[in-house]
Image: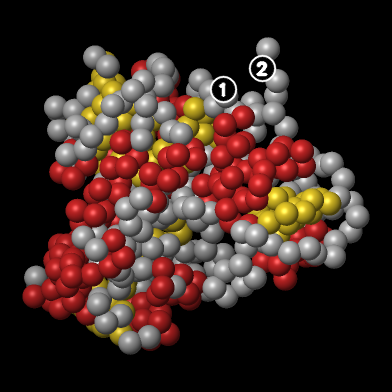
Amino acid sequence: MTSVPTLDTSFVAAALGDLLIEHAGPRVRFRRAVIDSREAGDGDLFVALQGTRVDGHQYATAAVERGARGVLAREPLDLRPDIALFVVSDPLAALQRIAVAWRDALDRLQVVGVTGNVGKSTTKLITAALLRSRYRVQAEAQNYNNEIGVPLCLLRLRPETERAVIEMGMYTTGEIALLCTWARPQIGIVLNVGPVHLERAGSMEAIARAKRELVESLPRDGHAILNVDDERVRAMVGHTRARVWTVGTSPTPDVYSADLESRGADGFFFTLHAVGRSRRVHVPLPGAHLVTNVLASAAAALADGVEFDAVCESIERLDVPTRLAIRRSTHGFTVLDDTYNASPVATLAALDLLGETPGRRIAVLGDMLELGDLSAVEHERVGRRAAEVADVLLTIGSHARGINEAAARAGIAETYHFGSKEEIAAAVRALVAPGDVVLVKASRALALESVVAELLASDDGAPST
């Protein structure tokens, strides 16, 4: 019988091997690794990373005070004698090595990797929900998808976990391939390829190559889940040894949707076709654009042996957070709070939801950043769509002026552009009336959550979904 691995000081020291310079303190068991002292809790291993603005070594004592039982650092620290200390020259490399060793020790675990420029987090949580009908599953709510986040995610896995669903992000080629060598996914989901981080990646072709690394890494007995509605994802079919499951909204993929019926903020209905079966299902999540996310998750679950009816029943019970929060004001209007970030695909999807929601429709849109040479054309495309669904458009940011001008040319009835968040917040506040629905969306750098807060300042603004 295989012994159950234990994430303790002995395991960490052995995993570090020649990276370990000094080890002091008692033998203790760790619950997980953390890099933020504010998140530290009882039994954690605090990893002191040095960032561009913050040096984690300055917060090691604070992490210990919050319950951390160990510290991984690049220099000896004056800690309590009951705290385990590991000194290494490169804490990030050490964190990664420990994570790989822990992943390798979990021999009953299988990993589902999820990538795409839009929808990774939502798909991760939906996939986890569908797999839970058969397996013990872990999926982090946080956006752990890079060279720091994936090791943290791996070190939170429990020995009894059978399936882990992990996001895999990228800025350029080579990154997802590296994450895959650590996590060793058996199933890989590729949702889409879009102009996110285009300025860093250099071209759409480079982004597609980077996303393709997930399916290229899969084993021969693995499963590649590909959204063939996206032409760049469709081209990945021949780049994997794994069995391919195609998903999409036409009748030709292995798993597809038909007769899509949106109920706006109340979710949507569609008929799921897969494995020779079909069934009408209700998805209790806002926005019919999420159908692709649901299809990909369903394909992953079916590939992993979950029965068709169990998949359908889990879809109808979905209760996962989405990036877009629906906030209903006590004053009778609704805010579609999608301020987390913005890309062209995500902004168009949010506008689709706005168009599916009854009431006077007000769109508050800001810059979509890191689009490189495609910035002007993508902002214009969003502007044309805004003119089709919104009654009033308010924009902020130098790039978003292109949204405004394109919407005006397309014939929107009412449009305004502002130079500051204070101005746009005051304008929306003056415009909004009972029965209205307000979409707020822009790139993270604009921090338009302050506009949402201003709109809901006189009530609790609690999300309804």
Which amino acid lies under the numbered mark 2 shown in the image of this protein? Answer: Thr
Q: Residue 2, labelled with which disc?
A: 2
From the viewer's side, name the closer residue of 90 and 462: 90
Q: In what element is the residue under mark 1?
A: loop
Q: Is 9 situated above or below 90?
A: above
Badge 1 vs badge 2, beta-carbon distance below 8 Å: yes
321 left or right of 407 in image: right
Q: Which residue is mark 1?
A: 108
At mark 2, the secondary structure is: loop
Q: Residue at x 31, y 73 (%)?
A: 366
The correct choice, above or below, for 251 with respect to 341 in the image is: above
Q: Nearer the viewer, residue 330 or 286?
A: 286
Specify few, some or many for label 1: CA neighbours under 10 Å numbering under 14, 14-19, or 20 or more: few
Which kind of residue does numbered mark 1 sit on? Arg
Query: Does the image show residue 455?
Result: no
The picture places residue 101, in percent across and down from the top left corner, at 60, 37
**Res 369 → quadrant:** bottom left
Question: Where is residue 445 shown, x and y percent of the image?
Answer: 41, 73
